[in-house]
Amino acid sequence: MDSFNTSFSRYDQLQDFVISVVLFLVFAIALTALCSSLLWCHFFVIFNKDKKKNKTTEDELSCCTV
């Protein structure tokens, strides 16, 4: 029955906590970068509308294409 012992050592708990924190930071940074790039593209389209009236919609969204 000793092989089914489910208690974790302090090292395992600390390692799980560190992995969780690192994964959280990776996702937070990735989402921040995605949102800031989309926001930049949104403002780019809005502010260029006033400057160039003859632009087509396809040209306006060209900043968002990869």
Image: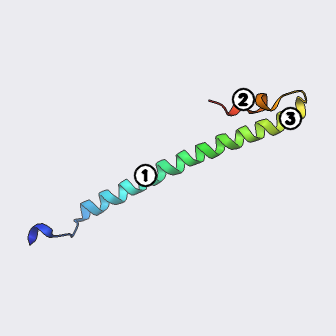
**Quarter of the rendering containing residue 2:** bottom left
Q: Residue at x 59, y 47 (%)?
A: 32
Q: Which residue appears farthest toward the bottom when viewing the image?
A: 1
Give the foreground label among 1 and 2: 2
Mark 1 near mark 2, Cβ–Cβ under 8 Å?
A: no
The amino acid beneath tag 1 is Leu
Mark 1 closeness class: few <14, some 14–19, many ≥20 residues within 10 Å: few
Q: Which residue is mark 3?
A: 49
Q: Which residue is mark 2?
A: 62
Which badge, 1 or 2, is on the more N-terminal residue?
Answer: 1
Mark 2: which secondary structure?
helix
Number of numbered callouts drawn:
3
- Image quadrant containing the N terminus: bottom left
Q: Position of residue 54 (x, y in %)?
A: 89, 27
Mark 3: which secondary structure?
helix
From the viewer's perspective, is 1 left or right of 26?
Answer: left
Q: Residue at x 83, y 29 (%)?
A: 56
Mark 3 closeness class: few <14, some 14–19, many ≥20 residues within 10 Å: some
Which badge, 3 or 2, is on the more N-terminal residue?
Answer: 3
Q: Position of residue 17 (x, y in %)?
A: 36, 60
> Disc 1 and disc 2: Cα gap in Å?
33 Å
Q: Which residue is mark 1?
A: 23
> Disc 3 and disc 1: Cα gap in Å?
39 Å
> Disc 3 and disc 2: Cα gap in Å?
13 Å
The amino acid beneath tag 2 is Ser
- Judging depth in this view, the residue of 48 and 17 nearest the camera is 48
Mark 2 closeness class: few <14, some 14–19, many ≥20 residues within 10 Å: few
From the viewer's perspective, is 33 left or right of 63?
Answer: left
